[in-house]
Amino acid sequence: MTDTLTPEREQYRPTRIRKVLAFLRNTWRGLTSMRTALVLLFLLALAALPGALLPQRDLNEPKVREYITQHGWWGQLLDRLQFFDVYASVWFSAIYLLLMVSLVGCLAPRSVDYIRSMRAKPVLTPRNLSRMPHHTRAELDADPDEVLAAATKRLRGWRKVEREEKNGARSISAERGYLRETGNLFFHFGMLGVIITFALGAMYSYEGQVIVFADGSDASEFCNSGIYAYDSFNPGLRVDGTQLTPFCFRVNDFKATYADSGQPIAYESNLEYQSGDDLADNTWRPYHLEVNEPLRTDGDRVYLLDHGFAPEFTVTFPDGSTRTHSIQWRPVDNTTGLSEGATKFETPGITDPVERRENQLAVTGLFAPTAMLQGKVLTSAGPQLTDPAVAVDVMRGDLGVDSGRGQSIFEIDQSMVDSGRLERVARENLEVGQQLRLDDGTTVRFDGVNQWVSLQVSHDPTQVWVLGFAVAMFAGLGGSLFIKRRRVWVRVTPAQGADDQRLTVVEVGGLARTDQAGYGEEFAKIADDLLSGDRKAR
Amino acid sequence: MPVNETLSQYSDWSYTTAVAVYVLAMVFFLVEQSFGRKGKQAAARTRSRELVGAGAPATTETTPPAGAPPARPERTRADRMGNMGVALTVLGALLHLLSLVLRGLATDRVPWGNMYEYIAIICFVTVVTWLVVLRKSPVRHLSAFVLLPVVMLMFIGGTWLYAIAAPLQPALQSYWLVIHVSAAAVGSGIFLIPGVASLLYLVKARNETNPAKFARFGPKLPGLEVLDRIAYRTTVFAFPVFTFGVLCGAVWAEAAWGRFWGWDPKETVAFIAWVIYAAYLHSRATAGWRGNRAAVINVIGFAATVFNLFFVNLVTVGLHSYA
C-alpha cells in the first residue's frame, strides 16, 4: 500500500484544472485581503473626485456642454472617458463592485469565525503569564478556592472558564468585549445593505419637475398620470413611466417673504392634493408646502423647488378680437427676481398657413418685480412683487413654431430673426395696465403678473431601507470603535510559606486585543481588586 | 426676525480679541517649544518607555506619570511660558465661545448659518479638543502647531468670508441645521488635530531614520508612539461624529432637495474624506501600513477636509454654497 501511495504523491502534476483552481484561489485571496481593500478604498476616493471638480450631466447638463465646447479635444476625451457621468461610469462601477466583492469575501469567513467564537470558551491560560503585556503577581495568605471565588465575583460580566492545570494550579481565563466584533459585522453588513439598496434605488426611483401657476386655476393643477405631465423627468433604469403612483395636486397660492435687505426669509405655498381613495370620491386635502417641508403622500414626495413670475399680456387685434396669455418667464437674477421670457401669440381668424406664419406675435424681454429704471434700461431693485414692470420687444412674423423643431418656451427662435422672417416692431417699457400700439393698430397690454412655482415629485421606494441599513451601520460603528476586546487570566498556585504557612500565589495577566485600547488602567484596577481585596478580607 | 446689532458688534469684538489672544498664546508656546527642555525630556521619556516595552514586559503601564520627577523641583522659565500659553488659550477659548453665543443671541438662531460662523465653530471645537488632549498627553509645547492653523482659519474667516449677522435663508430653516452642521463642524474640527499630529509624526519619523533631517526640530518632538496615539484616539472619536453628520445631512437632503444623496460636490468630497478616514482605520490593522503610511493617510484625510471646507464652498457651485 505504502509503495503505491508514495509515488502517487510525488507524481503531483499541475494539471490544467489545478492551475485554474490555484489561479482562482489566489485571485480570491488577493482580492479579499485587507491590502487590496485599502487600495480599492483609495481608488474609490480618487475616482469620486472628478465628480466634484467637473460638471456632471445629471446635475447640470448645460454646464457640461459648455465645458466640452470650451475645452475642445480635451473635453471630448473626458466625455468619452465618462468623466461627466462619473457615478454611472464603467470605471467607477468597476471599483465599487470590486470593493463589494472584497467586502463579501472578507465578511463571509469573518462571520463564520464570529459564530464560532461566540460559542467558544475563552482561550487556555498561557503557561507564562509574565510574558503578557500586563502582569502582576502576589502571594496571598488565602485559600485558592476563596481567591478563585472572589475572582469569579469580580469578573462578573466577563465570559470566563475555570480550568484545572498541572501541578495543582487552577486558573480562570476571562474575555470581554465580544460586542466589538458584533459591531464590526453590523457596520460592514450595514454598509453592504446601503450599497445594494442604493443601487436598487437607482433602478426603481424617479423624479420629475413641473412648473405650475400658483393661483388655483386649471394651470395650477398637476396629476401624476404619466411622463407627459412633467416638464422634465429623470427615470431610474427600470422606470418606463407607466404605473406611476396616481395623485393630483392644485397649487392655490405662493408667498415669498423677504427681509429689508432683500434676503429671502420664507417661501410657502398652499396646495390641495388627493391620492389613494380620495381620487375616487374627489376629496381634496389641504397642505401648507414649504422649503424643507415636502408633501408626503402615498410614498411619493412633492417639493417646492423654485418660483418665478409669469407676466400676463392681452393683445387686441385690429379686428377687435383679443387674446390673453400668461406663461412663465425664467429668473435671470435670483437675488433681484429679474426674469426673461417670451409670450407667443397667434393672430386669430387667419386660416391660410402662409399668412398665419407672417402674423405671429411674440412679446419678449425682461420682467422686474420691483422696477428700477436707469435711463430707459429696466432693472429690478428687489425680488418683492411691489412695482412690477416689463421692458418688451414685440416681434412679428414667423415664430418658427411650425418648423418641427422643438423650441424653448423662454425664447424666440433666433434663427428666424437672423433670416429676417421675424422682426421687431416695437420696444417699450410698460407698467401694469399700460399698453403699446403697433403700426397696424394692434395693442399689447401688460395686464399684470401671475406667480409660478416649480415643484419636484420624487419617488424612491428604497430610501427607507437605505436609512435602516445606514442606522445599523452607524450603531455598529460605535460598537466597533469604542468597545475594547480584552482578556484577563488569573492563576492560583498553592504554595508553602516559610514557617509552613499555607500561601496562594496569584498571578494576573492581561492582554488587550484591540489597537490603542488603553487597557492598562482597567487592568490595574482589576489586578488591584483581586490581589489586595483578599488580603483585606483576611 | 430683526438682528440685534449691538450684540452682533460685541460678538465681532470678542472674535477679534480671541484671535489676538490665540496669537499671543502661540508666541508663548513657540518660546516653550524652542527653548524648553521639556520637549526633549518628553521625547526621552517616551523613548525609554518604548524600550522597556519592547524588551521585557513592564509590570503595568500605569507607572506614575513621569510628570513630576524628583530631579526637577523648580519649574523652568520655558515651562512657565507653556503654562501661561495654556492659560491664554483657555482665555481665548472663552472669548471665542462668548463670540459664538453672542452671535447666536443677536440673530436668534444657532450661530452656524454661513461660512464665517461655520469656521468659527470648527476652530472652537479644535481648540477645546486640544485642551482635552493636553490633559492626557505631555504635548503642551506642540500647541503652537495646532493654534497656527486655527489662527489662520479664523483670520481667513474673519476677513474674506466675514458675513454680517443675518437671518437664515429658507433652505437652512430646519432643525437639521442644528444637528447636521454641528456634527459636521465637530467632526471637522477634531480632524484638524490628528492631521497636525500625523504631520508631526512624519517629521519625527524622518528625523529618526535620518537624524540629519530636522536635526534641531525633530528631537524636541515627543515620541512616535505619543503622536500616533493622539492621532488615532482623536480620529476614532471624530470619525463616528463625522459619519453621523453625513447621515444627518442625507436625511436633511431628503427633506430639502428631494433626494438623500445626489453627488453634490460637498456630498462627494465628504464621501471622499469619509473613505480616506475609513482607510486610515483599516490601515492600522494591516501589516505594512502601520506607522508612516497610516500617518500619510491621515494627512490626506485632513487635506480632503480642508478642501471640502474651502474649495467646495467657495469655488465650485453646488447646493452647499452658502458663503
Image (tube, coloured by chain):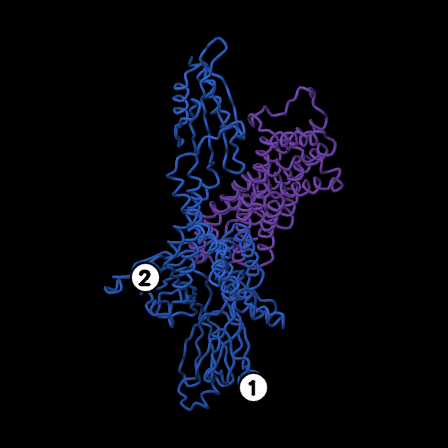
Chain colours: A blue, B purple
The image quadrant that residue A458 belongs to is bottom left
Q: Where residue A12 sits: x, y (%)?
A: 49, 57
Q: Nearer the viewer, residue B4 or A267?
A: A267
Q: CA distance from mark 2 to mark 1?
A: 47 Å
- Labels 2 and 1: the sequence-earlier one: 2
Give the residue at mark 2. Answer: A273
Q: Nearer the viewer, residue A391 or A57?
A: A57
Q: Where residue B278 sits: x, y (%)?
A: 52, 48
Q: Which mark is residue B66?
A: none
Q: Could you tell whether A349 is left or right of B282 in the image?
A: left
The image quadrant that residue A40 belongs to is bottom right
| Three-letter code for the amino acid on which mark 2 is drawn | Tyr
Residue A7 visible, this angle: yes
Q: Which mark is residue A420?
A: 1
The image quadrant that residue A278 belongs to is bottom left
Q: Residues within 10 Å of mark 2 (few under 14, many from 20)?
A: many
Q: Nearer the viewer, residue A516 or A243?
A: A516
Pointer 2 chain: A
The residue under the point 54% across, 61% down is: A336
Q: Nearer the viewer, residue A221 or A162?
A: A162
